[in-house]
Image (cartoon, grey):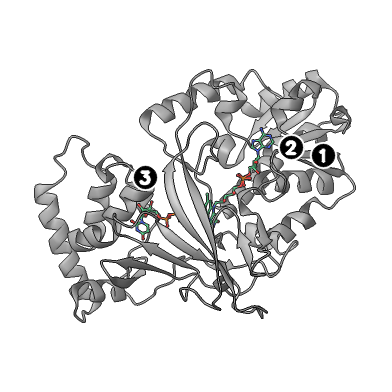
């Protein structure tokens, strides 16, 4: 691999990196080398056939595509068709099963009686008011996850479905967690039990990895797997454009410290039954159950004729990420945010590097957000590099000037 011969080096073959590589090759006709330290393309969206069951599994956990963005949806149609899969999740708590996210069916089941939407609202509002009178005076103040959750679903549903699950997922007192985390989960006073409410939703007909293969299949794109950027960084011409989608703290040698992440472990099991649990994802809310959820991937593709009466499941366990673990969810405490600001300040010394994606920006991004951000980064930061009059890929001075003009 002659890294120095490429106009652009992309670190990471996940959605952010693959979209930029595809755009650079197709729209600018420039050469790109995509590196990934893993042995496969696709980043965390990678999917593969399980050799024991023949079921397509998502190695890093169930990925459902959903978006409200017309631009992202249209863009992806170039690389895949989507099925009409609609995600529904159930939660096991205290020996019973409930619909999740919380909707009218969940409220009726939790209180053991039929309620109209207004009755359910009134019951929850009364519990929220009682908490408002007694709560919100703790050391952590207003705006923590517990207060926000009780304000939206009341004490009964919070204790039943949220408290234990959140404690397992974050190993942190919900009163110390940011309210934003729970903001991702809607609460509905109808019987609509869809997990996502976005306009577009579906599963790629032939899997996620096929999308990446099509994005990266281009004579101007080379893909090098099993290569860690930091093992080859000294071979990179300082005038090349680098798109870095790895962890931002690692890029700077952790000089300001390690940003906090949660990671998950998946325990794989193959069962000799055609259907293990009846749904793609079932959450386990009780604090005593050690895993947070069970994924059963065959339910993601009900349209497929699975030849074998076997199924693969993953039990998911959540914990703090150690230094060698895969970073999954940014914890984002106040000290993490301060550290991130210091790293941002340090990026100015690297005008030929663009930081992006989930790890590079230290943000929880869904796939459509990573794709949307990559399309914008291409348009506003990558393309201007090369379209400026008279500018050559090796013209470092012009590149720096272009970059400072862009960031001004
Ligand atoms: P990634 O996919 O993480 O890709 C980054 C790549 O960079 C990785 O392959 C990594 O190996 C590589 N890399 C890092 N450092 C180096 C280095 N030094 N050298 C070389 N390569 C390097 N989104 C949804 O829309 N729907 C879902 O249902 C959904 N479910 C999720 C479930 C889980 C458990 C998780 C963790 C995420 C989920 N997501 C979901 C989010 C989705 O995974 C991300 O939006 C997407 O992966 C972001 O793409 P990315 O390119 O930014 O990062
Ligand atoms: N959550 C919960 N019970 C559930 C599902 C989610 O308490 O059954 C809470 C939990 O705090 C979680 C947050 O809602 O961190 C966001 O859930 P989401 O489904 O977005 O988590 P993800 O799919 O990203 O793991």
Judged from the image, the secondary structure of the residue bearing numbered disc 3 is helix
Spatial separation of the CA atoms under disc 2 and disc 3: 32 Å
Q: Do the residues labelled 3 and 1 touch (CB within 8 Å)?
A: no
| Labelled disc at residue 170 | 3
Q: Classify mark 1 as within 8 Å of ligand 1 or not, answering yes or no.
A: no
Judged from the image, the secondary structure of the residue bearing numbered disc 2 is strand
Please name the residue that numbered disc 1 is placed on.
32
Residue 297 locus on image (x, y percent):
56, 67
Q: Are marks 2 and 3 in contact (CB under 8 Å)?
A: no
Q: Is residue 119 left or right of residue 270?
A: left
| Labelled disc at residue 10 | 2
Please tell me in which quadrant of the rendered image residue 213 appears: bottom right
Mark 1 and mark 2 lie on one chain; the one further toward the N terminus is 2
Furthest-front residue in this view: 272
Mark 2 surroundings within 10 Å by alpha-carbon count, few (fewer than 14), some (14 through 19), many (20 or more) = many
Mark 3 and mark 1 lie on one chain; the one further toward the N terminus is 1
Mark 3 surroundings within 10 Å by alpha-carbon count, few (fewer than 14), some (14 through 19), many (20 or more) = some
Which residue sits at x=84%, y=22%?
A: 395
Q: Nearer the viewer, residue 282 or 390?
A: 282
Q: Nearer the viewer, residue 300 or 96?
A: 96
Residue 380 locus on image (x, y percent):
68, 38
Residue 10 locus on image (x, y percent):
74, 37
Q: Classify mark 3 as within 8 Å of ligand 2 or not, answering yes or no.
A: yes
Q: Which of 294 and 260 is in front in this view?
A: 294
Q: Can residue 408 be seen in this view?
A: no
Mark 1 surroundings within 10 Å by alpha-carbon count, few (fewer than 14), some (14 through 19), many (20 or more) = many
- In this rendering, the label closer to the viewer, 3 or 1: 3
- In this rendering, the label closer to the viewer, 2 or 3: 3
Please tell me in which quadrant of the rendered image residue 360 appears: top right
Judged from the image, the secondary structure of the residue bearing numbered disc 1 is strand
Q: Is residue 173 left or right of residue 55?
A: left
Rendered-image quadrant of the C terminus = top right
């Amino acid at each position: 691999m002659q890294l120095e011969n490429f106009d652009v080096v992309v670190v990471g073959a996940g959605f952010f990196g693959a979209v930029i590589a595809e755009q650079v090759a197709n729209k600018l006709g420039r050469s790109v080398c995509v590196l990934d330290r893993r042995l496969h393309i696709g980043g965390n969206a990678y999917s593969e056939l399980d050799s024991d069951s023949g079921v397509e599994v998502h190695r890093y956990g169930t990925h459902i595509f959903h978006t409200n963005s017309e631009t992202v949806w249209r863009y992806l149609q170039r690389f895949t068709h989507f099925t009409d899969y609609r995600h529904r999740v159930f939660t096991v708590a205290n020996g019973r099963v409930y619909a999740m996210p919380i909707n009218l069916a969940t409220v009726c089941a939790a209180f053991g009686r039929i309620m109209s939407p207004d009755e359910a609202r009134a019951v929850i509002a009364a519990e929220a008011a009682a908490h408002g009178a007694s709560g919100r005076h703790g050391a952590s103040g207003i705006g923590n996850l517990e207060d926000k959750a009780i304000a939206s679903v009341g004490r009964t549903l919070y204790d039943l479905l949220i408290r234990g699950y959140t404690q397992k997922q974050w190993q942190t007192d919900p009163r110390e967690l940011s309210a934003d985390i729970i903001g991702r989960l809607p609460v509905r006073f109808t019987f609509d039990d869809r997990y996502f409410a976005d306009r577009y939703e579906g599963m790629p007909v032939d899997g996620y990895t096929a999308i990446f293969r099509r994005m990266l299949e281009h004579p101007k794109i080379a893909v090098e797997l099993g290569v860690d950027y930091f093992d080859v960084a000294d071979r990179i011409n300082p005038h090349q454009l680098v798109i870095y989608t790895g962890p931002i703290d690692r890029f700077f040698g952790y000089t300001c410290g390690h940003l906090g992440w949660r990671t998950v472990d998946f325990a794989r099991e193959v069962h000799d039954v055609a259907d293990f649990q009846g749904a793609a994802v079932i959450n386990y809310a009780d604090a005593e159950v050690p895993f947070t959820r069970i994924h059963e991937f065959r339910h993601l593709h009900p349209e497929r004729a699975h030849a074998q009466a076997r199924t693969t499941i993953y039990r998911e366990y959540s914990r703090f990420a150690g230094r060698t673990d895969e970073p999954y969810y940014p914890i984002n405490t106040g000290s993490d945010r301060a550290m991130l600001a210091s790293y941002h300040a340090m990026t100015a010394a690297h005008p030929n590097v663009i930081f992006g994606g989930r790890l590079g920006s230290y943000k929880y991004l869904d796939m459509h957000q990573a794709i949307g951000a990559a399309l914008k980064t291409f348009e506003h930061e990558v393309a201007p590099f090369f379209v400026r009059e008279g500018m050559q890929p090796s013209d470092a001075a012009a590149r720096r000037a272009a970059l400072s003009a862009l960031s001004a």
